[in-house]
Amino acid sequence: MIGFGGLNAFRTGVTLLALMFLALFLLYPLWIVLEASLHDPSGAWSLAPYAKILASRYYVGSLDNSLIAGALSMICATAIGVPLAFCLARVEVPGKSLLMTLASLPLVLPSFVGAYALVLLFGHVGVVTVALRSIGIPIGDIYGMAGIVIVFTLTLYPYVLMPTVAGFKAIDVSVEEAARNLGASRWRVFRTVLLPIVVPSVLAGALLVFIETLENFGVPSVLAEDRPFLSIDIFKLFAGESDSNPAAAGALSTLLVGITIAVLLLQRRYLAKRRFATGARRAPPTILLSRPWLLLATAYAWGVVLVSLLPFGAVLVISFLHFSGPVLSWQFGLGNYATLLHGSYQPLYNTGILATAAALAATLFGAPIGYVLVRHRSRLSTLLDVVAIVPFAVSGTVLGIGLIIAFNSGPMVLTGGWLILVLAYVVRKLPFSIRSASAIVHQIDPSLEEASINLGVSPLKTFVTLTVPLMAGGLIGGMVLVWVTVAAELSSTIVLYSSRWATMTVLMFQALEGTAPGQSAAAASILILFTAVPLLLVYRLLRRQDGSLL
């Protein structure tokens, strides 16, 4: 009979392998980036690159702009996401299931394409801008900080919405009833009881918005005009467009990683000092509103979702319009699609292959890691838990730079091929798979595994033949989420891709840079259709599990 010593050995082995993988493809590249930032032009160890950056008004302005855009986007996404989450969780809004599905779609559209679609509507000579000015209504254009925050808010608010919906649904109804019995109004109950309880869910989503904003490369490149941003400056410095000194790129990259890690630690510290559990036994019922309040809630919910889908509609319409260079004309046709597809199907093929490989690999690594983090408590698993959070704090551009420097020479050369792209995707998206796996493991009775092992089945075989099938729902949900987000990935792809492995997002970005917006919109429309079905599938899975994965 195989004892529990074998089980502990299996779990320790999984932990060590996971730490080795993350050390090689996450910590080592990040250390190289950090090390590059600690050398002066002569190669000696020095803090001069940081002193140079902090003394530069340009780079301090770049840092300020990135932080301001991240903070404002986080606040705005939270401001619209929390009320919407409450409406979808507790109010009988007409079309609630459809609303939740539509609210997930902004995650599909690459944000820089949505930004350009809004430029064509609200830019200097945008369709809406010109129309309003022609009837005497003055309106500014969408460029600058305001436009960047608007795009980020409309595309990233689902990160706040999804976990907050689950948070509101998990509150024990007795907590609300007790407050109401003490004479508190419904608004006061929401403000002083319900909202504080869902703070962990809100903070989790708001943090993702902040991090995604800091690392985003595409939106500032379309809307920033002359404003410097960290993500763009890091890419320019690495590519040699503005400085041949790699220390500057390393210093900016280290600052970006340091900021996001600091925010993560602040969040964990805040949550560790407070208690939010309610011991839920009964799910809260829907709230019966008077007709005026129900109409207001319905108008708000549908209004937010439809406005957030405006870039989708703009992209689809633009994809059928004719362009003379960058100039839009109202001639409808299929010319953009014909030109796009006449070239090559390779970018679409590459997107599918790379996203599939990354999703499968992330699930292969994430499933045992999520299992170990729930079932095995030790110093090693605690270390793994901490290291597994680091990808949340690393932008795709920074990780891409580190991987190129680390694996451009020596015994393991990966640059120029598909494997380095998949590794970058897996490392960046691994937290999604880990969270999906760990959430479902919490719902599996460990006595099932113990019984299998007591019957003589090895821990590895028990995990593969018993635990993994029971985890299937969560694993599939996490895998599809990874697939969708990888398909729309730009920041790491733009650094790592070679011409052989260009993806749809690279094709879109190059089309916009090369004044071919119609082809970019056509490519975006194809990508939307290409990814919408998996996203709708994962939402159905998440809905069946009542948001437990999020």
Image: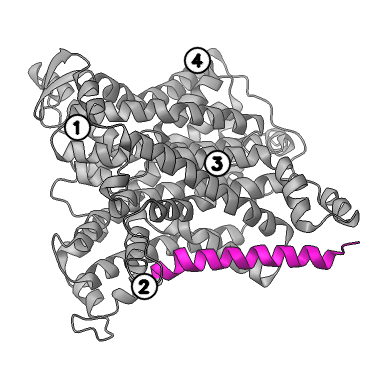
* Label 3: which secondary element: helix
Image location (x, y in percent) of residue 539: 55, 30
Q: Amino acid at mark 1?
A: Val
Image location (x, y in percent) of residue 257: 38, 63
Q: What residue would you read off at disc 2?
A: 410
Which comes before the other along the chain, label 1 or label 4? Answer: 1
Residue 26 is inside the magenta segment: yes
* Label 2: which secondary element: loop
Q: What residue would you read off at disc 4?
A: 292
Marks 2/3: CA–CA distance: 33 Å
Which comes before the other along the chain, label 2 or label 1? Answer: 1
Q: Nearer the viewer, mark 2 or mark 3?
A: 2
Marks 1/3: CA–CA distance: 33 Å
Q: What residue would you read off at disc 1?
A: 119
* Label placed on residue 67: none
Q: What residue would you read off at disc 3?
A: 479
Q: Tell me if residue 144 comes above or below residue 232 in the rendering.
A: above
Within 10 Å of disc 3 (Cα), the crowding (few <14, some 14-19, many 20+) is: many
- Is residue 78 at least partly visible in the picture? no
Q: Residue furthest bottom?
A: 44
